[in-house]
């Protein structure tokens, strides 16, 4: 389930893999209970006692490390997406400000992967195209406090 979340497979896949692993654990536990404790998990120690401590430590450390790395990876992705969104928002705000003041002469005609930026650049392209047909009072850069002052 954790790998499904990290790999962005989807919530349903992560949830279904969690329930499959949960069902498997319940089935194996029920079988061991029904068949007896010694049938499925022999109680003989095949591992030397000196190795048991190391294996117990690995049993504690490895799952915690995997969980930490998964959470770290998810938060790194979230941080990158947040930074990209903030940059996109700042660029969209700057473009909208220039569009609102009709200061579109220095905006380059480029394409963008961001949908909002792409729409704003289409507005700029259309404003440049139809600029000769727009009334002059729209293109003035003076500061008017109200419509009657202009």
Image (tube, rainbow, N blue to C red):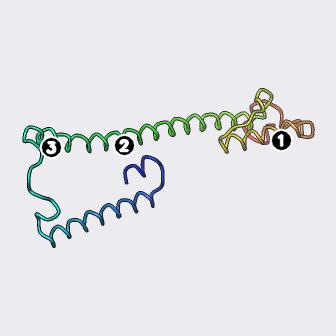
| Depth check, front residue: 38 or 68 | 38
Residue 60 at x, y percent in the picture = 19, 43
Mark 1 surroundings within 10 Å by alpha-carbon count, few (fewer than 14), some (14 through 19), many (20 or more): few
Identity of the residue drawn at 74% across and 37% down: 99
Q: Nearer the viewer, mark 1 or mark 3?
A: 3
Location of residue 30 by image quarter: bottom left
The residue labelled by disc 2 is: 70
- Which is nearer the eye, 104 or 73? 73
Q: Secondary structure at mark 1?
A: helix
Please identify the quadrant where the N terminus is shown.
Answer: bottom left
Closer to the camera in the image, 29 or 72: 29
Local secondary structure at mark 2: helix
- Using the image, determine if residue 47 lies above or below residue 15: above
Residue with the most extreme top position: 106
Are there few (<14), some (14-19), or many (20+) residues within 10 Å of tag 2?
some
Q: Quadrant of the C terminus?
A: top right
Determine which quarter of the picture holds residue 29.
bottom left
Q: Residue at x 28, y 39 (%)?
A: 65
Q: Are marks 2 and 1 in contact (CB under 8 Å)?
A: no
As drawn, the label of residue 140 is: none
Task: List x then y, in percent, for residue 141.
Answer: 79, 30
Whether residues under marks 1 and 3 lie with C-beta atoms below 8 angstroms apart, the answer is no
Which numbered disc covers residue 126?
1
Q: In the visual, does 94 lie left or right of 83?
A: right
In the rendered image, which residue does mark 3 sit on?
Answer: 56
């Amino acid at each position: 389930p954790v790998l499904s979340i990290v790999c962005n497979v989807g919530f349903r896949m992560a949830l279904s893999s969690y329930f499959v692993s949960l069902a498997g654990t319940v089935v194996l536990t029920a079988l061991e209970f029904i068949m007896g404790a010694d049938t499925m998990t022999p109680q003989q120690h095949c591992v030397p006692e000196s190795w048991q401590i190391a294996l117990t430590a690995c049993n504690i450390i490895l799952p915690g490390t995997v969980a930490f790395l998964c959470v770290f990876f998810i938060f790194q992705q979230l941080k990158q997406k947040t930074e990209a969104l903030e940059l996109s928002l700042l660029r969209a705000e700057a473009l909208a400000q220039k569009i609102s003041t009709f200061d579109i002469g220095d905006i380059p005609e480029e394409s963008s992967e961001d949908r909002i930026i792409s729409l704003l650049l289409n507005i700029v392209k259309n404003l440049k195209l139809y600029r000769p047909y727009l009334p002059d009072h729209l293109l003035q850069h003076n500061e008017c406090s109200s419509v009657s002052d202009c």
